[in-house]
Amino acid sequence: MPADWLNLTTHRLDIYNESLAKTEFLEHFQNLFNKNSSDTTSLNELPTAFDYIRLGHPLSCILEWTIANLLDISSENVISFSSKTAPILAILRKNLFKNKNTLICYKESLPNSFDADILKTIYGYSFELQKISSINEIPNYNGSIIVIDSPEDTCSFTLETGIDFFINIHKELGSIVVINGAQNTDYISEIQHVRRRETIAMTPANSLVALNNLIKQSFTKNQSNQEENKNTVKRVIKEITEAPTEALVASSGLSIQYAILMGLIHHAVINHKGKAIKIVVPPNCYGGTNDQARRIAACLENVSIMDLPVDGDNDMVQSIDTVLAEIASEDAVPFIIAEIPTNPRVEVPDLTKLRDVLSKERTSNTGNAIAPVFILDQTFCPNVHFLGEKEILSSVQTISFASGSKFPSGGKCTAGYCVGNKKAQHLIEKIALHLQICNNEATDFQYEILAEQLPSMNQRIKDAYLNTRQFVNYIKETLPEAKINFVSEELASQGFTPSVFSLDLPTKGTSDEERELYKRALNLKLINLMITKIPNESKYCVSYGQLKGCYWTIPATSTQGTTKEGDKDYIARVAVSPNLDLELHKKVFLDFVESI
């Protein structure tokens, strides 16, 4: 097995064909299997499987392929999850739109985190529950039948006709769902998309345990000092953020974001009965954030999306003022998601004006307007203090979150976390509840990685920023016509020291279309040169905050995958680490400049 199968959280875009994703990886894997070829070099050259971790990765794909072969069904019909409840929620979500009944039959017990009342009242899902001791007790039913079991061998399934979904749950590893019968094929992509946007696949470490169990027929748990690691992580996050609330740590950045939104919606349903809820999202922000918010709104009648133009020609503060005025006029509940600095243009708004516009008292037709909750994505600069008693956003209900696959873990795991300020303290309980309902807390192994990596995070941020500033200055000297989006020296002195910048390369042509096509081709030329000349350090990947090397991507074709076409950014985004051969990167960049 290539070491990266266990250790990487980012996918190589140069060997990734999104439209084929899992099928391409498994087709090539099957070819190797047929040839009885399993050397590390051959396995390492397989196309990227899904998009590493959230939607799946080599080890989860092989686990699913193995189970499917044992059952003589398509591997697409087997989907593994880190969460024990997420596959159930995925089926319920699909049936919500199909207006179809669901019967959940369980043999021993439902997962501890399964809360039937909240899933019905807050998520809007409809279902019936029935405890059974054998398959024979399942009645004829007009709708989908789910059978939940917790066998010793989590990979063992006995498929029966008339049952639509079999879910095996393992207390340590997560869950595996088998989609049974041709009539349920349209559930496959929907269940996979829940895994991509609201949770993650069974982690590489746990998939490996499951595969080893399948071979050895015995369960061997990865040993880690769970409580000590968890306490370390929460203590260090508190030190870094200076937030008054205890951190909530989830299996990924999108897992924590889902818990935040569902927790806030739950709080609003109780405290602002009958009022509309508005989730305000930048239309060009990271595709997962955008897509997830819209998926939540699609499920709930009282929730809708409002766009927040934040960068380029738009001013975040002005946009928030306009949007909040409109929400106040409707007497609705505002939740605002924004990244600071913004992605991919790395812009920071005037923070004093931001605080003032978020704190401004507005009136609705019934009295005072409902104060907004500001959901701050701090992934680019998780070291900046926003939430302490005297910090800039202390007067605004603020929840801050960060993706752990970036600086917190140095790219070693996907876990994400959130904290709140004093004004938002009353919201944390509901967010924690929904993190539990979705069974999306970080795994033991993720806590272990964060406990190792978080203590050095602030130093790594400083070192990476210094490398980035040098690289940016060099590009300005050698290619002054390029437009670079990066923080100013003044912002850096205030603590905003990201290590990512975006590069708008100079273009030529007689029409807008020609100029755009030329620039896009130039982006790829630069990236291909970098990854070819510096293969050990320069990667064509979506990442940031990694421990070493330099990662290149084009947001429009990666992180903004589900963003509307007109809002996409066809520019190069460059993420620099604290540990790389900067002189070699400068030299190759100079070669690129001389070639154009």
Image: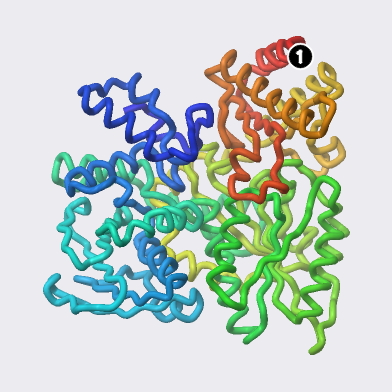
Amino acid marked by disc 1: Ile
Q: Residue at x 54, y 54 (%)?
A: 254
Q: Quadrant of the N terminus?
A: top left
Residue 292, percent from left and from top: 56, 59
Q: Which residue position holds label 1?
A: 596
Identify which residue is drawn at 47% across, 42% down.
413
Q: Nearer the viewer, residue 509 or 487?
A: 509
Q: Quadrant of residue 585?
A: top right
Residue occupying image coordinates x 39% and y 34%: 24
Q: Quadrant of residue 312?
A: top right
Q: Position of residue 270 (x, y in %)?
A: 58, 84
Left-right relation of 167 to 478: left
**Is residue 201 positioned above or below 144 on the image?**
above
Judged from this view, the residue extending furthest toward the bottom is: 366
> In this view of the protein, can residue 223 be seen by the observer?
no
319 sits to left or right of 408: right
Q: Which of 543 and 139 lies nearest the eye of the viewer? A: 139
Picture quarter containing residue 280? bottom right
- Would you call the spot at circle 1 few (<14 residues within 10 Å), some (14-19), or many (20 or more)? few
What colouring style does the render use?
A: rainbow
Residue 503, given in percent of the width and then of the height, sits at: 75, 30
Count every numbered label the image shows and give the total.
1
Whether residue 238 is situated above or below residue 300 in the rendered picture: above
Which element is circle 1 on?
loop
Kindly identify the residue that appears in the image at 58 percent across and 20 percent down. Answer: 531
Asked whether the viewer can see residue 316, the reply is: yes
Towards the viewer: 455 or 564: 564
Q: Indicate whether 152 appears above or below 508.
A: below
- Residue 27, given in percent of the width and then of the height, sits at 32, 33
Task: Name the quadrant of the C terminus.
Answer: top right
Work out whether 3 lies above or below 396: above
- Relative placement, left or right, of 375 versus 30 is right
